[in-house]
């Protein structure tokens, strides 16, 4: 079903028990949606909300992760590392509201680590590590993700696959398989436990428009294709509004996604 939707005022948003945000890499909308290489992602799109006018805000990767996490690219225009910021962000706002946040990074060499790179791990894709107001304890290896016991998840989680499983250095099929194996259980659980899975991409393949797939799946999501224009800032503002947090930086001026909820 095609829906025009809108990203206007706050309206009525669900208070999801848990929200998990998964960020994949460097694929345009048409490389994934409708592709035979991505059967699981297209299954998710069919049972959730697929945004057909979703766009990243920049190139290369790092500014987009910062925008999604803090409402600003923080003036970053490249993938340099390390960086340190003191700006408010999704995690710091959650902590201030006595809620919880954890970032799970696949191939992270040590819990709480801040190394720039190690094998297939890349800090440029792990935005929360760059913020001085987010404690190292919030940074965990994806091996710590509570598979099968999802009620132990924090209020909001970011999940960052490694450079192969996020489609950056490996195929669409590789990333699709990783998502099914590692987040499929949560996606099913979220459908009956008032929780939310967001799957999005940091940027496209460099083609005009920077259009990327973005999918919401969960018990409170109305399935359909939504033509409302969205970007990193509107996704962040929507998460913040769900938990009654103050929107960060440019997220404050972005529309909240209201049309997709039951």
Image (cartoon, helix red, strand yellow):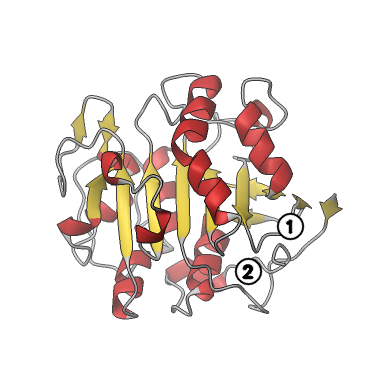
| Residue 110 shown left or right of residue 66 in the figure | left
Q: Is residue 158 above or below residue 90?
A: above
Residue at x 30%, y 41% (from the top left corner) = 142
Which secondary structure lies at badge 2? loop
Where does residue 180 sit, x and y in percent of width and height?
Answer: 52, 33
- Report the quarter where the C terminus lies: bottom right
Q: Is residue 23 left or right of residue 162?
A: right
Where residue 97 appears, as percent x and y from the top left, is 34, 80
Q: Is residue 59 visible?
A: no
Graded by Cα atoms within 10 Å as few (under 14), some (14 to 19) or many (20 or more), the crowding at tag 1 reads some
Q: Residue at x 17, y 35 (%)?
A: 109
Q: Which residue position holds label 1?
A: 228
Q: Quadrant of residue 176?
A: top right
Residue 200 visible, this orientation: yes
Q: Which residue is mark 2?
A: 255
151 up-or-down from 122: above or below: below
- Which residue occupies the foreground of this view, 35 or 182? 182
Q: Residue furthest right?
A: 1
- Whether the residues at callouts 1 and 2 have beta carbons within 8 Å, the answer is yes
């Amino acid at each position: 079903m095609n829906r025009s939707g809108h990203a206007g005022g706050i309206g009525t948003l669900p208070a999801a028990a848990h929200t998990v945000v998964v960020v994949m890499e460097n694929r345009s909308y048409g490389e994934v949606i409708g592709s035979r290489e991505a059967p699981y992602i297209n299954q998710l799109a069919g049972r959730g909300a697929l945004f057909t006018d979703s766009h990243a805000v920049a190139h290369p990767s790092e500014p987009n992760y910062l925008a999604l996490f803090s409402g600003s690219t923080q003036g970053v225009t490249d993938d340099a590392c390390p960086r340190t910021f003191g700006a408010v962000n999704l995690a710091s706002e959650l902590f201030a509201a006595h809620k919880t946040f954890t970032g799970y990074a696949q191939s992270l060499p040590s819990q709480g680590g801040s190394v720039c790179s190690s094998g297939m791990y890349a800090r440029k894709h792990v935005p929360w590590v760059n913020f001085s107001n987010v404690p190292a304890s919030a940074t965990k290896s994806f091996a710590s993700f509570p598979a099968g016991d999802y009620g132990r998840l924090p209020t909001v989680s970011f999940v960052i696959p490694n450079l192969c499983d996020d489609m950056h250095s490996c195929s669409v099929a590789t990333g699709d398989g990783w998502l099914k194996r590692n987040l499929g259980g949560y996606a099913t659980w979220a459908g009956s436990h008032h929780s939310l899975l967001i799957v999005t991409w940091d940027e496209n393949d460099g083609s005009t428009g920077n259009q990327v797939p973005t999918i919401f799946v969960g018990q409170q999501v109305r399935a359909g294709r939504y033509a409302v224009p969205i970007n990193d800032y509107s996704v962040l503002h929507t998460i913040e509004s769900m938990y009654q947090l103050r929107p960060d930086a440019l997220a404050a001026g972005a529309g909240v996604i209201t049309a997709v909820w039951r």
